[in-house]
Image (cartoon, coloured by chain):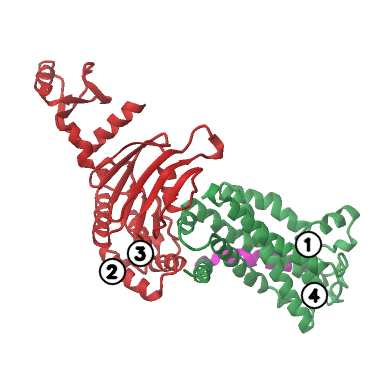
C-alpha cells in the first residue's frame, strides 16, 4: 500500500470535482475581479502613489494582493465544503477503514483543496503588470511564495472549521462571521500602516494580514510598512499554523466524527 | 479471520450506557452474517469495530483482514464516474492498475454494470448506485465485506437482486460478509443471524438452528386478543401446533378473520426482543 498513491488519487479527485463544477471557479475568481475593477475604478482619481504606481491605477495595484487573498479564501471555503460532504456521506469512514495512513487521507484533502485554491488565486497575479506594477523576477517569485503560504494557511483553517461544524449551513455562517471579517481587517483594501490605531493593531494581529502583506511587499519590491522584515516569518507561521491546525483537528476528531 | 474478545465500547457522551458490552464473536472466511437489532442496539458500533474505524474501550479485536465497507447511503462521489470512483478507492488500498482492470472487468459483469462504468454516479438510479457502491468495495479484493443496510431505500425488485449478487460474490470468492439489516427476510438467507440489544448479543446462530426449537409452533395473526397465548407483537401470536385447530375454530365461530403461517426469523427476532424488553 502506498500512501503516495492514495494521496495522488485523492488529489486527482479534488481537481476533477473542481473542473466539473465550473461555477465554483467563476464564483472564486469573478467576485475579486469585479471588486478590483469597481473599487479600483471608483477610487482611480482619489488615490495615487501606492505600490510605486503614480497614475490612476495606484489603488487597483494596491488592491490586487487583497483580491488574491479573497480568491484564495473563496477557493478554500468552496473546497472545504467537500470535506463536510465526504464526512456526511460516509466516504471518509469508508476511506479511513482502508490501510492508507489517516495522515495521508487528511494530507491529501489539504493538498487537494489547497492546490486548486493556489492556482485559482495565482491566476490574478499577472494582473500586476496591467496595473503598472513591475516586480523583479525575485519579487515575482516571492509573491508566488506568499500566495502559496496564504492559500495553504487559509485552506488549513477552513478545513479545520469545516470539520468542526455540523453541516454546510453552519459552515456558511462561520464563513460570514469569522472568515470574511478576518479578510476585511487584513488590510486587503486599505493601507493599514496609515489607518487609525485600533484598525492598525487589529490588522497587525490578524494572521490573514501577514501573507497578504508579504505578497504586497514582494510585488512592490519594498519592505512591509506594517511588519518590516517580520512579514515573511509571520507568513510562514500562518501557513504552518493553518496546516497544523487542520491535520491536528481532523486526526484527533476522526474517531469521534466519522 | 477476525475475532472480538470481550469487546466493549463506551462513548463519552453516555458512559453508563455502553454501545457494545463485552461482546465476543468470531467471523470466518466465506461466512455470511446478518446483524439484527433495534435502533441503538450497537449494530453500527459493531460494524465500526470490525472496520477498524472504532477502537474498543475494553477487550480485544484480533485479526486484520482486507476490509471494505458499504454504507446505507451511497458514499460514492456523484460528480465522478463509476470507474473513477472505483479507481480512486483502489488506489487508496494500493491495488495495481492491472489488478484493478481485471477486477472491474469481472465484477462489473457480475453486477450488470459493464455498460454504465463511464456514467457519472449522479445520473444512476438508487439500485444502480448501490451496485456501483458494491463494485467499488470489491476493487480491493476484500476478505471481509461490511454492509450497513445494503438495500435501504431500494424498491422491492432491486433489493433481492442486490442480496442475490452479494451472496453469489460470497460463494465465488469466499468473502466473509457481515450485513446489518432491518429487513428480516434478508437475514433468512444468511449463514448466521446475530441479534443485538442494548449492546449485547442476545442470539447468535444459524437461521435453521434458530427456527428448529419453533418447529412445533405456528404464528397466528388475528385482530382478536388471545390473552392465553404468547404474543409477539400486536395481533401476532406464537401458538403450539396442537392448539391451532381449537383456536381457529373459535375464531371462525366469532367470525374473526385470521391467518396462520410457519414461524419466520422475524418472529424469532420479535420473540427474542420481547424477552429482554
Q: Residues within 10 Å of mark 3 (few under 14, many from 20)?
A: some
Q: Of all residues shown, which one is farthest toward the bottom?
A: A137
* N-terminal-most mark, 4 or 1: 1
Q: Which residues are magenta?
A: A20-38
Residue found at x 40% / y 65%: B120
Q: Residues within 10 Å of mark 4 (few under 14, many from 20)?
A: many
Residue bearing mark 1: A209
Which chain does the red colour mark? Answer: B
Above or below residue B214? Residue A241 is: below
Residue B186: x percent and y percent? 26, 45
Residue found at x 74% / y 62%: A238
Which element carries disc 1, helix, strand or loop?
helix
Q: Are marks 4 and 3 on the same chain?
A: no
Q: Residues within 10 Å of mark 1 (few under 14, many from 20)?
A: many
| Side of B241 relative to B233 (left or right) | left
Which element carries disc 2, helix, strand or loop?
helix
Residue bearing mark 4: A218
Residue bearing mark 3: B141
State the count of labels. Answer: 4
Tag nearer the camera, 4 or 3: 3
Which chain does the green colour mark? Answer: A
| Chain hosting mark 1 | A
Tag nearer the camera, 2 or 4: 2
Above or below residue A58? Residue B10 is: above
Residue bearing mark 2: B106
Amino acid at each position: 500500500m502506498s500512501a503516495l498513491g492514495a494521496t495522488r488519487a485523492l488529489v486527482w479527485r479534488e481537481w476533477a470535482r473542481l473542473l466539473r463544477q465550473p461555477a465554483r471557479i467563476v464564483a472564486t475568481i469573478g467576485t475579486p475581479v469585479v471588486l478590483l475593477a469597481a473599487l479600483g475604478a471608483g477610487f482611480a482619481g482619489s488615490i495615487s502613489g501606492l505600490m510605486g504606481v503614480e497614475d490612476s491605477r495606484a489603488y487597483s495595484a494596491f488592491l490586487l494582493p487583497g483580491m488574491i487573498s479573497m480568491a484564495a479564501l473563496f477557493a478554500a471555503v468552496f473546497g472545504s465544503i467537500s470535506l463536510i460532504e465526504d464526512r456526511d456521506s460516509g466516504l471518509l469512514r469508508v476511506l479511513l477503514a482502508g490501510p492508507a495512513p489517516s495522515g495521508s487521507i487528511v494530507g491529501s484533502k489539504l493538498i487537494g483543496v489547497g492546490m486548486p485554491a493556489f492556482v485559482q488565486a495565482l491566476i490574478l497575479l499577472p494582473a500586476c503588470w496591467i496595473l503598472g506594477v513591475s516586480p523583479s523576477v525575485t519579487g515575482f517569485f516571492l509573491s508566488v511564495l506568499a500566495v502559496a503560504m496564504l492559500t495553504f494557511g487559509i485552506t488549513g483553517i477552513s478545513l479545520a472549521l469545516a470539520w468542526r461544524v455540523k453541516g454546510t449551513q453552519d459552515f456558511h455562517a462561520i464563513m460570514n462571521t469569522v472568515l470574511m471579517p478576518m479578510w476585511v481587517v487584513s488590510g486587503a483594501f486599505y493601507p493599514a500602516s496609515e489607518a487609525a490605531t485600533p484598525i492598525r493593531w487589529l490588522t497587525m494581529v490578524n494572521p490573514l494580514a501577514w501573507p497578504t502583506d508579504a505578497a504586497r511587499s514582494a510585488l512592490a519590491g519594498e519592505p512591509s510598512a506594517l511588519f518590516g522584515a517580520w512579514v515573511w516569518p509571520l507568513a510562514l507561521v500562518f501557513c504552518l499554523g493553518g496546516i497544523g491546525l487542520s491535520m491536528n483537528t481532523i486526526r484527533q476528531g476522526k474517531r469521534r466524527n466519522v | 479471520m477476525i475475532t472480538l474478545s470481550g469487546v466493549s465500547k463506551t462513548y463519552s457522551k453516555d458512559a453508563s450506557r455502553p454501545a457494545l458490552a463485552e461482546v465476543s464473536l468470531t467471523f470466518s472466511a466465506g461466512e455470511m452474517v446478518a446483524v439484527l437489532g433495534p435502533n441503538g442496539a450497537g449494530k453500527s458500533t459493531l460494524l465500526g469495530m470490525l472496520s477498524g474505524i472504532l477502537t474498543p474501550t475494553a477487550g480485544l479485536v484480533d485479526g486484520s483482514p482486507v476490509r471494505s465497507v458499504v454504507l446505507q447511503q451511497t458514499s460514492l462521489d456523484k460528480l465522478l464516474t463509476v470507474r473513477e470512483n472505483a479507481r480512486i478507492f483502489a488506489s487508496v488500498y494500493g491495488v495495481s492498475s492491472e489488478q484493478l482492470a481485471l477486477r472491474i472487468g469481472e465484477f462489473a459483469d457480475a453486477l450488470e454494470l459493464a455498460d454504465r462504468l463511464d456514467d457519472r454516479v449522479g445520473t444512476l438510479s438508487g439500485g444502480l448506485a448501490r451496485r456501483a457502491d458494491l463494485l467499488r468495495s470489491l476493487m480491493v479484493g476484500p476478505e471481509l465485506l461490511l454492509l450497513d443496510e445494503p438495500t435501504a431505500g431500494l424498491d422491492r425488485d432491486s433489493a433481492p437482486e442486490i442480496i442475490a449478487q452479494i451472496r453469489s460474490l460470497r460463494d465465488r470468492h469466499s468473502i466473509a460478509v457481515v450485513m446489518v439489516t432491518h429487513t428480516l427476510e434478508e437475514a433468512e438467507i444468511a449463514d448466521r443471524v446475530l441479534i443485538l440489544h442494548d449492546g449485547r448479543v442476545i442470539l447468535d446462530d444459524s437461521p435453521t438452528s434458530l427456527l428448529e426449537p419453533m418447529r412445533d409452533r405456528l404464528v397466528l395473526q388475528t385482530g382478536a386478543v388471545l390473552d392465553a397465548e404468547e404474543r409477539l407483537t400486536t395481533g401476532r401470536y406464537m401458538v403450539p401446533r396442537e392448539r391451532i385447530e381449537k383456536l381457529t375454530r373459535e375464531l371462525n365461530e366469532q367470525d374473526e378473520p385470521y391467518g396462520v403461517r410457519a414461524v419466520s426469523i422475524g418472529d424469532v427476532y420479535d420473540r427474542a426482543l420481547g424477552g429482554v424488553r
